[in-house]
Amino acid sequence: MAFKAGTTLKQRLAALSLPQPQSSSSSHGNSNGHGRERERDNVEDVMARLIFQAGVDFETRPMVVFNASALPDPKQVDYDVLLARITAYLALYVESD
């Protein structure tokens, strides 16, 4: 995902949480739009509990918390989709540093 120059970390994180188009092939075999939309909503719910910012350090860099206990059952959320979302989310923190 490409971002415009001058966007803040907060703006980029907000853009990342917007619904993203997904490929038509899903490992769960959902062939209708409702299944993909529900799966996307599940990933967004998990992300809200899994990774969050807990303030800043003494150099005003964001401190990020990864709450592993919030990882869902792999039967509920496609871990391939979740991993892609996690890495994209964390990459924004790395880019902003």
Image: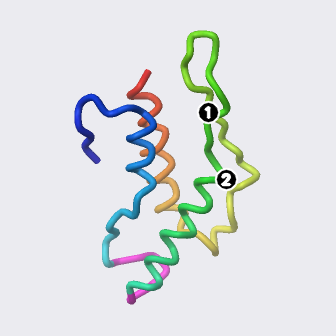
Q: Could you say which is closer to the camera, residue 39 or residue 14?
A: 14
Tell me where residue 67 appears, x and y as whole percent: 71, 45
**Which of the two discs, 1 and 2, labels the residue nearer the N terminus?**
2
Q: Which quadrant of the figure has residue 27?
A: bottom left
Report the magenta residues as a range.
Answer: 25-32
Structural distance between the alpha carbons of marks 1 and 2: 12 Å
What amino acid is at disc 2?
Arg
The residue labelled by disc 1 is 64
Q: How dense is the environment of label 1, judged by Cα within 10 Å: few (below 14), some, or many (20 and up)?
A: some
What amino acid is at disc 1?
Val
Question: In this rendering, is residue 4 above or below 79?
Answer: above
Q: Is disc 1 placed on a helix, strand or loop?
A: strand
Tell me where residue 84 appears, x and y as whole percent: 44, 53
Question: In this rendering, is residue 91 above or below 34?
Answer: above
Q: Is disc 2 placed on a helix, strand or loop?
A: helix
Question: In this rendering, is residue 13 above or below 74?
Answer: above
The majority secondary structure of the magenta stretch comes to loop
How many marks the image carries: the answer is: 2
The residue labelled by disc 2 is 49
Say if the magenta span includes residue 11: no
Specify whether 4 is left or right of 95.
Answer: left
